[in-house]
Amino acid sequence: MGDRVPGLFTLVLHSHLPWLAHHGRWPVGEEWLYQSWADCYLPVLRVLDRMSGDETAAPISLGITPILAEQLDDPHCLRGMHHWLGDWALRSREAIDSPDPRTRSIAAYECRRAAAALDEFEGRWRHGLSPVLRPLIDAGTVELLGGPLAHPFQPLLDDRLRAFSLDEGLRTAQQHWGTRPTGIWAPECGYRVGMEHGYARAGVERFMVDGPALHGDTSLARPVRNSGVLAFGRDLTVSYRVWSPKSGYPGHADYRDFHTYDHMTGIKPARVTGRTVDSADKAAYDPARADAAVDRHVADFVNTVRGRLIAESERIGRPAHVVAAFDTELFGHWWHEGPVWLERVLRALPAAGIEVGTLADAATAGYVGAPFELADSSWGSGKDWRVWNGPQVTDLVDLNASVVTETMAILDKEHHTARHRDGVLLRDRVRDQIVRELVLAVSSDWAFMVSKDSAASYARDRARTHAHAAREIAETALRATSERACDVATRWQVADGPFPGLDARRLAPSDAVALRRTADRLE
């Protein structure tokens, strides 16, 4: 055990994929889900499961977006994942006879990985993520962070839809794991002035922002104005050691190259080798060589955290808090060796005298500074909103604004004519599906993918498809018979059926939101 280091370190992981079920397979669609499941979610949960039985291991704060949780419990996705794992096992065997010597050299390694994943899935995952994760939450290995339903960029969202999406998202977490999160990963770390009041109303006590939103001083959580809701900032000095826009461990020459495929088998046979080396010229992947690099990067990260905690504690004159935050999908999907690095670093940090705790632990222990006048921000390019409302996504901004305005107006009109029984407003599956399509349409993923030119046409198609669905169902409900509207809603629900507990009756009428907005301004 190393000398005790002042302060507290927290590792935060944010797990998210958009709704992919029934919306394409390859190159974008369900394949993205199954690759992430096999390469990231299976091994990361395996790591956390091993950590839960070790009293010396470090806990983490783990965000699971409601839309990802729905897919990892969905029967269609579970069947598809089982088939995908079987196909992976077959492709790995075919690699033994590949004409590419790099692929042949890694075939046995890949066969072992595929067989282990298939065995684990059949033994532990056949009923989805919920029964795998809940024991880790109950044991305190994981602090669960929640979020809004389908990962919207909240600062640009209609007030009513934002409040509804967050509350329903927290309800969804409770349905999956028996606990309603009091901390969230705000999608894209997006914030606009006043959102803290909505957080407080939803029972959210803490949320993540990017470091620059706190002017780079992330040494303590900060209450946002007079709300009492805490903003925790991502420490970029530490986080960028792992992953940054220009560098980080996954780009090391000895790690597995994400972009180089053997197209006959789908296996990635090469190591990074060099940033300017063409795929055809990259060297064969060597697991032993990569494993040695993991140890070096674990040591580097522990030293970085140690130095940062000491320096920040000296600077502020009290023990400091350091938060490193990443997308969970980095660990295994984008960075093949990430889960191994994760387990080793979570054991190495406490062994080096560094106290590791969750965001909740930090709040309880008093790692809280003075109130802060948080400004509009995100963790995207420029740390502002340009990724989600810049000129390259004007069409999506306009689409979101129009479909929300149109469908919400129809929902308001239908609210006053909806069926009642004994004075109680009855649940309406048509209204539920309108709202379901609406929250899928305004997912932040579509604008992000367009802005980053990553499957941009797929993203635009997805946004337009869900917007069309919301409009079609709403207009049918307004103009046709209830039977016809129900038929249309049911047809769309076959493909878009997440959140069975979503209840449109909880979407506040427009007059109630106007009163709430006035109250927020007065505060």
Image: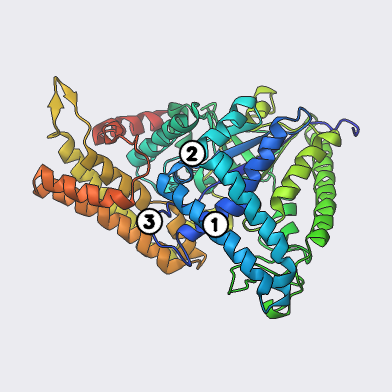
The mark lying in front, picked from 2 and 3, is 2
**Disc on the earlier residue, 2 or 1:** 1
For disc 2, the marked residue is 127
Camera-side residue: 376 or 297?
297
Which amino acid does the dot numbered 3 rest on?
His
For disc 1, the marked residue is 86
- Give the CA distance from mark 2 to mark 1: 17 Å
Tell me the element at label 2.
loop
Label 1–label 3 contact, CB within 8 A: no
Which amino acid does the dot numbered 1 rest on?
Gly
Is any atom of residue 368 visible in this view? no
Q: Residue furthest top?
A: 422
The mark lying in front, picked from 2 and 1, is 1
Q: Position of residue 66 (x, y in %)?
A: 46, 41
Mark 3 neighbour class, 10 Å CA radius: few under 14, some 14 to 19, many 20 or more: some
Residue 386 is left or right of residue 352, and the answer is left
* Residue visible at 12% across and 35% down in the picture: 417
- Give the CA distance from mark 2 to mark 3: 19 Å
Residue 523 is left or right of residue 502, and the answer is right
* Residue visible at 72% across and 66% down in the picture: 106
Which amino acid does the dot numbered 2 rest on?
His
For disc 3, the marked residue is 22
* Residue visible at 63% across and 73% down in the picture: 262
Label 2–label 3 contact, CB within 8 A: no
